[in-house]
Amino acid sequence: MKSPPVLSSESLHEIRAAAVQAELHPESLLRIPLVKRAFTSPDFRLVERGIDAYWNYQNVIPIGISGFNPLQGAYFYAKSSFFSRWLKRPFASARELNENDLLLKEVLFMAHDFLHSWAYQMVEKLRPEAEVFSRGIDAENIEEYSFYHLLSEAVATVGLDYWFLSINDANHYCDLGSTKGPVTVSYRESHLQEYRRFCPDFEVQTPKFLGKITKFYCTGKFPGFDASDLRHSPRLLAWLRHELSYGVTQRRLTRSWLIFLADEPIEMTETELSAPVSVTPEHELLIEELSRALWQLVKHDEDLCGRWVEPASRRHSGHRREPDFRFLNLNLWESEQWRGLKFGQDSKAFQYLLYQYLAAIPFASVPRERLKYVKLMTRECDPQLVQLLLADLPRLPVGADEPRDLFIAN
């Protein structure tokens, strides 16, 4: 086998184009079909952000904060990360870079985000009148757009996890000694008989399953199982307990995100944010059409969406809106714009500001004694204290294509 070419002097665009015809090392992550599909798609961008993933790798920041925005048709990655290093030679063995499966996790989330964006494009193609990329959000239509977003989440989860990785994990395609299976669920097809003990006709590997998961995310109801089943099967409990809580979280964050992007103020209580989303007969028809297309993409590597259509405009938040750094990219804000903000005690909104501020500092440049201040800053929720303790440290340059609106919360 020929050695993979050294591509450090070439542009990312050229590397991605070359991957279509490249001879791959047996341990290249591009041997995973959905990964290669996402990586080589001419319509899906890979966007570098001026952040350092080592804050997350070292568990100082408990979540990844590269961010996500399906309206952008892009995967956002940290400038300092295993992913950015992998981009220099994606055709080569990934084993050396896949420390603790961190690289594989990032690469699989690229495929996950690709499917999110693909779903939005398919909705635009199947229902152009919905204007999923651009129509203004208001109190009358927020539930409609909540459904579309939850549908895109179901597409990404069903396509990558339930229909792909639950059958054959990454090691099936490139043996890295990985322990990583599906990225967001614990379902495994090999456990099907245990699940059928409680629901005899339960089936995942069918296009109809997308409808079950979409409705589950929207309503919190999973047909075929009940609470007593969960008590009698730890394996079933481990799978569905996560999905039940995940659905509630998705509804709350989806509505919060859309409220932030809305053209007018919309008020919702915490209960209203998490409430079920209605699934209409028209929605069910769309799910059916989308499920057939997703099945072809995942199972047969056939993309019925075709070339993506660049939307004439993309929905975005208003510049006069009160900032919410769960959904805003702090890299595009000067400190003068946010250090005077006030936050309540234990503010989640402040935590995301802090996480973003930290991540833009090269982790290796931070004196060890400064890391002790993270708990103090988290507790005090004071942007001026953050500036006082960290403003003298270097910061990574902002990426050229970073967007203002980013779904950071997770």
Image (spheres, rainbow, N blue to C red):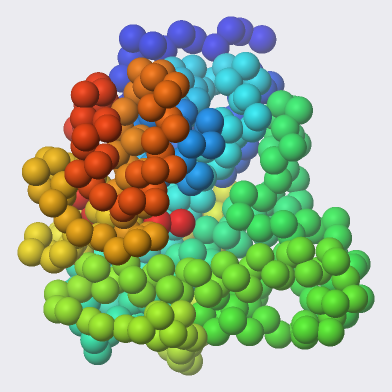
Image quadrant assignment for residue 206: bottom right
The relative height of residue 85 versus residue 44 in the rendered view (above or below) is above
Who is closer to the viewer here, 19 or 167?
Answer: 167
Left/right placement of residue 73 relative to residue 156 reads: left
The relative height of residue 301 versus residue 238 in the rendered view (above or below) is above
Q: Total of numbered circles in the picture?
A: 0
Who is closer to the viewer here, 77 or 4?
Answer: 77
Q: Position of residue 386 (x, y in %)?
A: 26, 40
Residue at x-position 44% and y-position 43% = 375
Who is closer to the viewer here, 395 or 210?
Answer: 395
Residue at x-position 54% and y-position 20% = 91
Image quadrant assignment for residue 259: bottom left
Residue at x-position 76% and y-position 28% = 177
Q: Quadrant of the N terminus?
A: top right
Question: Can residue 283 be seen by looking at this rendering?
Answer: no
Left/right placement of residue 161 relative to residue 37 reads: right
Q: Position of residue 101 (x, y in %)?
A: 64, 32
Q: Position of residue 199 (x, y in %)?
A: 84, 80
The relative height of residue 35 versus residue 234 in the rendered view (above or below) is above
Question: Can residue 197 be seen by looking at this rendering?
Answer: yes
Left/right placement of residue 323 relative to residue 355 reads: left
